[in-house]
Image: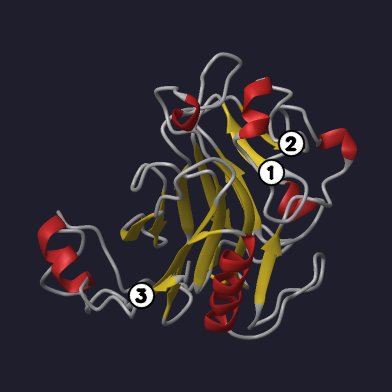
């Protein structure tokens, strides 16, 4: 199946008017952006991911390399140490302190987990549902299906913004149940992009957005309809909920947050 690549979304103007996200009197038009997403096997998604990398521009900046004004960072989980794998206490600061890539993570749940067993260590039946895009570790929140990603200038405490962000999902069965929401530094939602569905177990989808400039301060990722636990069954195995986990994160090099912002919440 060929990837679906969407043209720049200038229709954000209409979205802003409907949702009243931006003050109509003294702010510029909201930023335009391009959506790049796909569903299919690993080769199809890899091809789309390469297009997303090209849209971000520049080269891959290695972990722990100094902040720079161009390029991208990536997280594929496979280099996470064994001591922090298959436990529910993966550090939220790992990818800005231990491996400096400018990302802090949080969840309304009870923790974060990097897993090398396709989450079979949580529920044996999940091994038939999930497959790693870049073998063999996957990522998910504990006690929640939501993860928030906040950006920092790599290896520092300085708030950052990125040009774009994308994520590979494993086993999205229901369209729109999985999505990525993008916010600026004022908390204004810039975009909310649903994942397409890939019917059947162990398929992949990719969701990404690239803006004209670095403006995204955080993203909220909703993975499926429920948190993973020992009893819940995926909808493709006759369960009632679509269970989804994450693999690769790809995003622009975090840039320092500008001292002033052109955007403000409506009153």
Q: How far is mark 2 from mark 3, CA to CA?
A: 32 Å
The quadrant where residue 151 appears: bottom right
Q: Which residue is mark 3?
A: 6
Q: How far is mark 3 from mark 1, CA to CA?
A: 27 Å
Residue name at image x 78 percent, y 38 percent: 116
Residue name at image x 36 percent, y 75 percent: 6
Residue 129 in the image: above or below residue 207: above
Residue 165 percent across, percent down from the top left: 52, 65
Residue 146 percent across, percent down from the top left: 48, 38
- Mark 3 residue element: loop
- Mark 1 residue element: strand
Residue in the foreground of this view, choosing between 130 and 247: 130
Residue name at image x 39 percent, y 62 percent: 184
The quadrant where residue 52 appears: bottom right
Residue 231 in the image: above or below residue 256: above
Packing grade of label 3 (10 A; few <14, some 14-19, many >=20) is few
Colouring rule applied to residues: secondary structure
Q: Which residue is mark 1?
A: 138
């Amino acid at each position: 199946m060929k990837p679906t690549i969407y043209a720049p979304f200038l229709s954000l103007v209409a979205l802003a008017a409907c949702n009243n996200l931006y003050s109509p009197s003294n702010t510029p038009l909201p930023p335009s952006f391009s959506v790049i997403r796909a569903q299919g096997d690993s080769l199809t998604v890899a091809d789309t991911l390469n297009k997303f990398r090209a849209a971000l521009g520049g080269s891959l900046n290695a972990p722990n390399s100094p902040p720079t004004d161009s390029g991208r960072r990536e997280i594929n989980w496979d280099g996470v140490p064994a001591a922090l794998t298959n436990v529910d206490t993966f550090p939220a600061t790992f990818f800005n302190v231990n491996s400096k890539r400018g990302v802090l993570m949080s969840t309304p749940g009870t923790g974060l987990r990097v897993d090398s067993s396709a989450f079979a260590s949580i529920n044996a039946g999940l091994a038939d549902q999930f497959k790693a895009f870049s073998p063999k570790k996957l990522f998910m929140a504990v006690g929640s299906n939501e993860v928030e990603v906040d950006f920092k200038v790599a290896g520092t405490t300085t708030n950052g913004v990125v040009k774009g962000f994308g994520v590979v999902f494993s086993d999205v069965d229901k369209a729109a149940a999985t999505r990525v929401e993008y916010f600026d530094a004022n908390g204004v939602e810039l975009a909310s992009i649903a994942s397409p569905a890939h019917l059947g177990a162990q398929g992949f989808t990719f969701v990404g957005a690239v803006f004209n400039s670095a403006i995204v301060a955080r993203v909220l990722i909703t993975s499926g309809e429920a948190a993973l636990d020992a009893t819940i069954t995926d909808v493709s195995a006759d369960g009632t909920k679509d269970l989804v986990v994450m693999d690769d994160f790809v995003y622009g090099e975090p840039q320092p947050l500008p001292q002033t912002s052109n955007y403000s919440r409506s009153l």
